[in-house]
Image: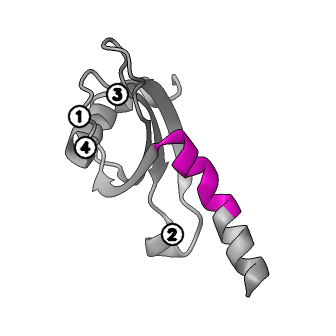
Amino acid sequence: MRTLLTVVAALALPVAVLGADSFEYKLTFPDGTPGVMHARVEKAGDKAGDKPSVRCDYFVSQEAEMGLPDMPLGSWSGSAEDKKADRTAIRSLCLDHYEDALPPD
């Protein structure tokens, strides 16, 4: 039991130290693709101009429907304009950059 607690604490430490938030969204992308979107937000620094950094990962939803792993579509990284990086704002930001994450045809 003690070993399990040590492992859990070790895995949780990097997230606590980095001050990151992670969000998962099940949605339909703007092009009609059913998907899953993962977003990770690294907190902004203490300086006035610092903005949170954001990474958005986009996947075609297959796990629930077919029992297959979700298929990656692409990723986008950037920064949030607002220091208030809540769940709704990050969802909008990631969807705004969905087309930027897709590989070219």
Nearest-to-viewer mark from 4 and 3: 4
Residue 44 visible in image: yes
Where disc 4 sits, the SS reads: loop
Circle 2 Cα neighbour tier, 10 Å, few/some/many (<14 / 14–19 / ≥20): few
Question: Which three-letter amino acid code belongs to the residue tagged 2?
Answer: Glu
Question: Which three-letter amino acid code belongs to the residue tagged 3?
Answer: His
Question: Which three-letter amino acid code belongs to the residue tagged 1?
Answer: Lys
Where disc 3 sits, the SS reads: loop
Q: Is mark 1 in CB contact (under 8 Å) with mark 4? A: yes
Residue at image location 35% in from the left, 21% down from the top: 51
Query: What residue is disc 4 on?
Result: 86
Decide whether residue 69 is among the magenta residues: no
Sequence-earlier tag: 4 or 3: 4
Residue at image location 25% in from the left, 43% down from the top: 86
Query: What residue is disc 2 on?
Result: 63
Residue at image location 35% in from the left, 49% down from the top: 33
Query: What residue is disc 3 on?
Result: 97
Nearest-to-viewer mark from 1 and 2: 1
Q: Is mark 4 in CB contact (under 8 Å) with mark 2? A: no
Sequence-earlier tag: 2 or 3: 2
Query: What residue is disc 1 on?
Result: 84
Residue span colored magenta? 10-19
Where disc 1 sits, the SS reads: loop
